[in-house]
Amino acid sequence: MKLAIIGATGNAGSLILQEALARDLAVTAIVRHPEKLTVDVPVLVKDLFDLTKEELASFDVVIDAFRPPLGQEELHQISLKHLSTILQGTDTRLIVVGGASSLFIDETHRMIDFSDPKADYYPTAYNMYQAFLKLKTTDNVNWTYLSPAANFVPNGERTGKYQLSDDHLQKNAAGASEISMADYAIAIIDEVVEPQHLNQHYSVFN
């Protein structure tokens, strides 16, 4: 199996890369700044927006861990649109490191519906949600969208365990909705190795 990780030097992307290597997967890092990599892997030095269908055709799975700069959160929508377009009609799976804003909190309302538009996190939450909605309506794309819990902890403990949920926000026994990025990385590579959520939106929490 050949796996590509877009954004492999970011917080989530670097942990996903480490997890993939620990499973002996054939991984290529798609990055703009290869000097930031801390492991020796094949590299495609390319801006996400310049990627072509031909460049991704050889991969079985592409993980999108792209995170735009502050102030350019609309790139969440543009980037996912670009990736879904060039992967249309191919056998390559697109697995997206998603956001929690798209998770339902009851039968009709999602987290984004109760988010404060003035909050610092709102531009990211809103644009990730809109990107997700457009992905869902794109035909002939083999996509999977994995949302973390509400609190996505960059330096959290790698417990080696996680709980699965559907597209509804869940809390653990302590009443917290959270997951470490390290445990999220385990979950996403589990999905790479044993696909269980083809064309589905699901979530994980500790």
Image (cartoon, helix red, strand yellow):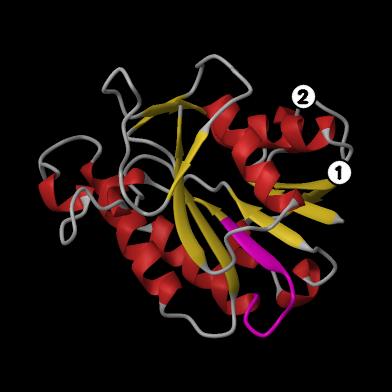
Q: Would residue 40 appear left or right of 19 to someone viewing this image?
A: right
The residue that disc 1 covers is 25
Q: Is residue 92 magenta?
A: yes
Residue on which disc 2 sits:
38
> Gap in Å between the C-alphas at discs 2 and 1?
17 Å
Residue 142, position in %: x, y? 62, 72
In this view, 136 is above or below 149: below
Three-letter code, disc 1: Leu
Local secondary structure at mark 2: loop
Viewer can see residue 10:
no
Q: What element does badge 1 sit on?
A: loop
Q: Give the percent coordinates (x, y) of residue 99.
A: 39, 46
- Write the start and end of the magenta stretch as one range: 87-95
- Who's the residue at 74% across and 76% down the image? 91
Q: Is residue 83 left or right of residue 93?
A: left
Residue 160 percent across, percent down from the top left: 63, 23
141 to the left or right of 203: right
Tell which circle, 2 or 1, labels the residue nearer the N-terminal end. 1
Packing grade of label 1 (10 A; few <14, some 14-19, many >=20) is some
Q: With respect to residue 86, does 109 lie above or below?
A: above
46 in magenta = no
Query: Which three-letter amino acid code belongs to the residue tagged 2?
Result: Thr
**Dividing the image into 4 quarters, which one contains the N terminus?**
bottom right
